[in-house]
């Protein structure tokens, strides 16, 4: 696929990196020569210096032949204009724009008659949602959703004290309440994936990925570690774009304190966040943290735009007695280094937001993509179309599907008659018409099923996509 | 300082005021109540002075009125007009001194409602009409003053509302935009007055009484045509009407105007003062009802509620009607009413006192200091609604509140030095400075201000104007720096 990416910032670079490894033909446009040079060194991409809002620049970038435009510059306006030009002058099929301001998210405004944006992405919002999920599930390293929130994929570090730890996976069903089922999709031990089957024994410190219906997640997580008490007090370091957004969501449910270094910025966010306690201080200032009772905090989020500051602040908070700390870390080397050390969760912003983008890039009918383990693994939600004649999956049992190493079908979501959702605690949780099935070797895939596939190695993603594509005779 | 434009504008205002006197003259002619001569002479004098001032001031080329001139114009308007307003009273009522007449007219035009006349039931109807009509005219002036002019002058933190109100944006020339604003506000004011009159009639009042009481209610004045005030009617429906319209008049007229223009109630929901206004009011009514039942003043809950609700609204909004002698209530409840009167009315209403906006800001500032003591590094802006109150406004509000209290204390001391007993002295100052009307003790609901000496009466007149002009407007003129070129 020929793709033009506008903007070589953090988002643009991670998009380029994710896509260039998949045999795509990529051109990146940015005004910053140095950023481009850096990318050109690392990746197999073409670069072009220029203002992405000019038709001539876009033309030079080869947009005339491009299948997709990914406009992810810092400026919403540039992204909008580029999409419009791509549609009106060059007729590019798919146009994705990064829009930071929610003001632009009006369907009429983004329609083909106007700015012609097919998909709007907002990395800051994705990261905010992601962090908020993590706080709802304080045990998890990662919480991802599929099928509009019906299925959850949770990464948990196994700790002694979890019911299943030290036992083979097949014992899990014996502990779980009736009607609750889950699938261990992958286990990473010492950063290496191991192929789980029923006999695999879960060891302490394993990073375990579990798939289950969203309402069953709590009892499932109890299998792997002792539950923590729900989060009540959160401290956020850094009141920038992400910090302020996260605080804005959290302040409705939790006691939130935000530490911001710049006094003027602190005043701005204090005006935006009526319920939040905003403090003007350095997040790495031990005295300030102690003064604000860091040891009483259930969660510390280091969300400044400086990796080193985040790592130091989070480590400091952990040492001063905070329950659980999270640091936003852009550099992958840092993230690998610190997670599991002094810092409980090292979050790579690019990795979080790339999933949304990949969803739109994948071939076949892909409903959702989540990038895992900093891009090494991927979980896809694919829609099975067609029938037994033109599809390689529909009308077949799981055991009949071709085996691909490191790929597992984790769950199937099937449309049924509306029924009541029963939570893990036995309480009804509302109605739905989408049933979550944890498949076994004899489960049959039906047309319209959403199939959630877990790929431990990214190289297998292509094969999976091909598997789900309907043969040409379908048309 | 350029006097000519100020005097030219003042001349026009005096002429308009003189023309307004034609209305009570008409009433007098209609009823043949014997006050025609007084009004004719007063009108002649007022028009003469007004026209003279206007003509003389128009001879030089003074240029436009500027923002700074506003202080002088506003100050002069509220001190000079009572002089002309007092004329009909002075000419008609025998034995009334100039001091007393000026006090009565000031009380009318500042919509205070303190009176030193008695035997109101037997006064010529046109005199009573004029007294309440002054309330109504004063109310009109107050609205424009509070919504358009004071924010422009930036009095006591008023600039907070400068942008919000459909008010004057041009900082250079004072008149044209204010005229626009005033027109809109007055339409609402007049419509509400008509509604209030109709409601009083429907509640069983005679037509002319209804008109005059409606004037009094809408201006949040407090003059009645009866010595017993609203107690004369002893009617629950009439009291209810008074409560409803006094409450309405205690809300910012800019909010009324926005609601009226957009034909929706959304403007009220967005007004940050309203929750506090109604909240404090409701809490006070409940508190005092329980208190009066507990102390055995009233046996019946409904009776207690009726009188408490009426007086809470009447005194707190600075209307100042009485339906019973609440001077007989325990001192705590009387002080509570007086206390409410000093801050409850919203900014931009016809009510008096320091206004709810400033009270809320003060309260939040105190809370902010407490936060800062607990968290030394906290950044905690004071917010009013969705808006952050800047330091300039905050300082203005703090200074305003300080000077307000300083004036209460010093005027009380002056009054008591002149021989008044302390409760009367204090409550007379509070009642006039807040433009409420009745005080406590000798100037309470059963008595009136006629027992004061001339000196004390002048102090009260001064306090009324000071309160109405939000202190600073007058203080600015009294500062030497204002007069330097």
Image (tube, rainbow, N blue to C red):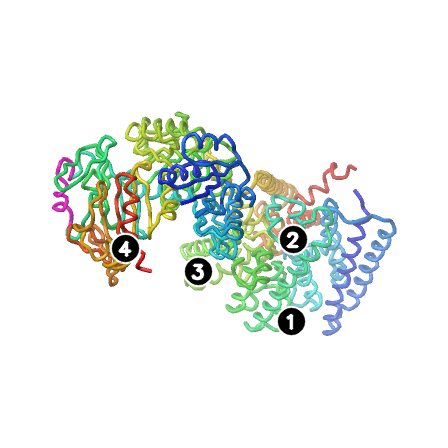
Q: Residue furthest right?
A: B59
Q: Quadrant of residue A348?
A: top left
Question: Which numbered disc, 3 or 1, marks the residue that appears first in the sequence?
Answer: 1
Quadrant for the C terminus of chain A, please: bottom left
| Mark 2–mark 4 distance (CA, rounded to whole Å) | 63 Å
What element does badge 2 sit on? loop
Q: Quadrant of residue B84?
A: bottom right
| Mark 3–mark 2 distance (CA, rounded to whole Å) | 47 Å
What element does badge 1 sit on? helix
Q: Position of residue B387 (x, y in %)?
A: 53, 46
Q: Position of residue B355 (x, y in %)?
A: 57, 49
The disc label shown at residue A280, or none: none
**Labels 2 and 4 touching (C-beta < 8 A):** no
Question: Which numbered disc, 2 or 1, marks the residue that appears first in the sequence?
Answer: 2
| Mark 1–mark 4 distance (CA, rounded to whole Å) | 83 Å
Q: Nearer the viewer, mark 3 or mark 1?
A: 1
Q: Would residue B409 be visible to someone looking at this image?
A: no
Q: Position of residue B481 (x, y in %)?
A: 74, 36
Q: Which residue is mark 4?
A: A384
Q: In the image, B29: left or right of B196?
A: right
Q: In the image, A238: left or right of A192?
A: right
Q: Which residue is mark 3?
A: B298
Q: Which residue is mark 2?
A: B167
Q: In the image, A55: left or right of A99?
A: right
Say if the magenta span includes residue A169. Answer: yes
Number of on-image labels: 4
Q: In the image, A187: left or right of B331?
A: left
């Amino acid at each position: 696929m020929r793709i033009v990416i506008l903007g070589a910032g953090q988002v643009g670079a991670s998009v380029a990196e994710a896509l260039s490894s998949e045999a795509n033909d990529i051109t990146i446009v940015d005004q910053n020569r140095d950023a481009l040079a850096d990318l050109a060194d690392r990746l197999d991409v073409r670069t072009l210096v220029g203002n992405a809002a000019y038709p001539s620049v876009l033309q030079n970038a080869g947009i005339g032949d491009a299948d997709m435009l990914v406009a992810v510059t810092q400026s919403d306006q540039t992204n909008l204009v580029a999409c419009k030009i791509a549609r009106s002058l060059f007729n590019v099929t798919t146009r994705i724009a990064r829009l930071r301001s929610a003001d632009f998210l009006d369907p009429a405004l983004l329609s083909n008659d106007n700015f012609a944006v097919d998909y709007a992405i907002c990395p800051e919002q994705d990261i905010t949602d992601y962090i908020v999920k993590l706080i709802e599930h304080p045990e998890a390293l990662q919480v991802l959703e599929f099928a509009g929130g019906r299925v959850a994929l949770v990464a948990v570090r196994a700790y002694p004290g979890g019911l299943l730890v030290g036992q083979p996976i097949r014992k899990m069903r014996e502990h779980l309440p009736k009607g609750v089922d889950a699938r261990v999709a992958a286990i990473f031990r010492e950063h290496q994936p191991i192929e789980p089957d029923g006999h695999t024994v879960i060891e302490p410190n394993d990073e375990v990925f579990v798939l289950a219906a969203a309402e069953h997640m709590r009892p499932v997580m109890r299998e792997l570690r002792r539950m923590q008490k729900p989060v009540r007090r959160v401290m956020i370091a850094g009141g920038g774009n992400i910090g302020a957004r996260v605080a804005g969501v959290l302040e409705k449910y939790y006691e939130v304190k935000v530490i911001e270094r710049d006094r003027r910025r602190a005043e701005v966010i204090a005006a935006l966040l009526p319920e939040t306690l905003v403090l003007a201080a350095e997040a790495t200032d031990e005295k300030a943290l102690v003064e604000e009772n860091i040891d009483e905090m259930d969660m510390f989020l280091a969300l400044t735009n400086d990796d080193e500051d985040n790592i130091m602040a989070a480590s400091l908070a952990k040492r001063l007695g905070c329950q659980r700390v999270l640091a936003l870390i852009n550099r992958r080397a840092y993230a690998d280094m610190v997670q599991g050390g002094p810092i409980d969760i090292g979050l790579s912003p690019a990795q979080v937001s790339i999933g949304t983008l990949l969803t739109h890039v994948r071939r076949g009918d892909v409903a959702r993509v989540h990038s895992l383990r900093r891009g090494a693994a991927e979980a896809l939600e694919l829609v099975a179309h067609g029938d037994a004649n033109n599809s390689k999956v529909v009308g077949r049992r799981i055991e009949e599907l071709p085996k691909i190493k490191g790929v597992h079908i984790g769950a199937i979501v099937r449309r049924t008659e509306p029924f009541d959702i029963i939570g893990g605690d036995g309480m009804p949780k509302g109605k739905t018409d989408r049933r979550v099935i944890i498949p076994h070797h004899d489960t049959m895939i039906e047309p319209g099923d959403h199939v959630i596939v877990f790929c431990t190695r990214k190289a297998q993603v292509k094969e999976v996509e091909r598997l789900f594509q309907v043969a040409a005779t379908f048309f | 300082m350029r006097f000519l434009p100020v005097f030219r504008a003042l001349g026009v205002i005096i002429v308009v005021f003189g023309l307004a006197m034609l209305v009570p003259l008409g009433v007098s002619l209609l009823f043949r109540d014997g006050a025609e001569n007084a009004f004719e002479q007063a009108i002649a004098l007022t028009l003469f002075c007004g026209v003279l001032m206007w003509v003389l001031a128009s001879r030089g080329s003074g240029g436009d009125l500027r923002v700074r001139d506003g202080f002088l114009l506003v100050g002069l308007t509220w001190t000079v007009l009572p002089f002309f307003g007092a004329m009909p009273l002075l000419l008609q009522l025998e034995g009334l001194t100039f001091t007393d007449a000026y006090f009565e007219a000031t009380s009318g035009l500042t919509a205070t409602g303190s009176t030193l006349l008695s035997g109101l039931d037997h006064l010529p109807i046109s005199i009573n009409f004029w007294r309440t009509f002054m309330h109504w005219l004063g109310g009109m002036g107050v609205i424009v003053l509070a919504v358009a002019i004071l924010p422009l002058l930036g009095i006591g933190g008023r600039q907070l509302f400068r942008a919000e109100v459909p008010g004057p944006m041009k900082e250079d020339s004072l008149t044209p935009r204010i005229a626009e604003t005033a027109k809109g506000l007055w339409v609402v004011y007049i419509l509400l007055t008509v509604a209030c009159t109709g409601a009083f009639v429907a509640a069983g009042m005679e037509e002319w009484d209804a008109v005059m009481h409606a004037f009094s209610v809408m201006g949040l004045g407090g003059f009645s045509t009866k010595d017993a005030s609203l107690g004369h009617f002893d009617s629950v429906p009439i009291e209810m009407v008074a409560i409803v319209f006094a409450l309405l008049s205690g809300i910012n007229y800019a909010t009324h105007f926005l609601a009226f223009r957009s034909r929706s109630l959304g403007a009220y929901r967005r007004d940050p003062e309203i929750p506090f206004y109604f909240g404090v009011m409701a809490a006070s009514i409940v508190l005092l009802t329980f208190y009066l039942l507990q102390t055995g003043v009233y046996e019946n809950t409904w009776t207690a509620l009726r009188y408490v609700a009426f007086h809470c609204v009447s005194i707190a909004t600075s209307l100042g009607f009485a339906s019973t002698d609440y001077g007989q209530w325990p001192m705590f409840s009387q002080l509570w009413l007086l206390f409410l009167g000093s801050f409850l009315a919203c900014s931009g209403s016809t009510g008096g006192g320091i206004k709810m906006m400033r009270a809320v800001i003060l309260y939040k500032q105190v809370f902010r200091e407490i936060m800062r003591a607990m968290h030394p590094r906290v950044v905690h802006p004071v917010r009013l609604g969705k808006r952050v109150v800047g330091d300039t406004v905050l300082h203005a509000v703090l200074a305003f509140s300080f000077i307000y209290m300083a004036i209460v204390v010093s005027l009380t001391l002056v009054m008591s030095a002149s021989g008044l007993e302390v409760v009367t002295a204090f409550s007379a100052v509070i009642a006039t400075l807040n433009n409420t009307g009745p005080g406590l003790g000798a100037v309470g609901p059963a008595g009136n201000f006629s027992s004061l000496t001339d000196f004390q009466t002048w102090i009260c007149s001064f306090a009324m104007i000071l309160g109405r002009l939000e202190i600073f407007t007058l203080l600015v003129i009294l500062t030497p720096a204002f007069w330097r070129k």
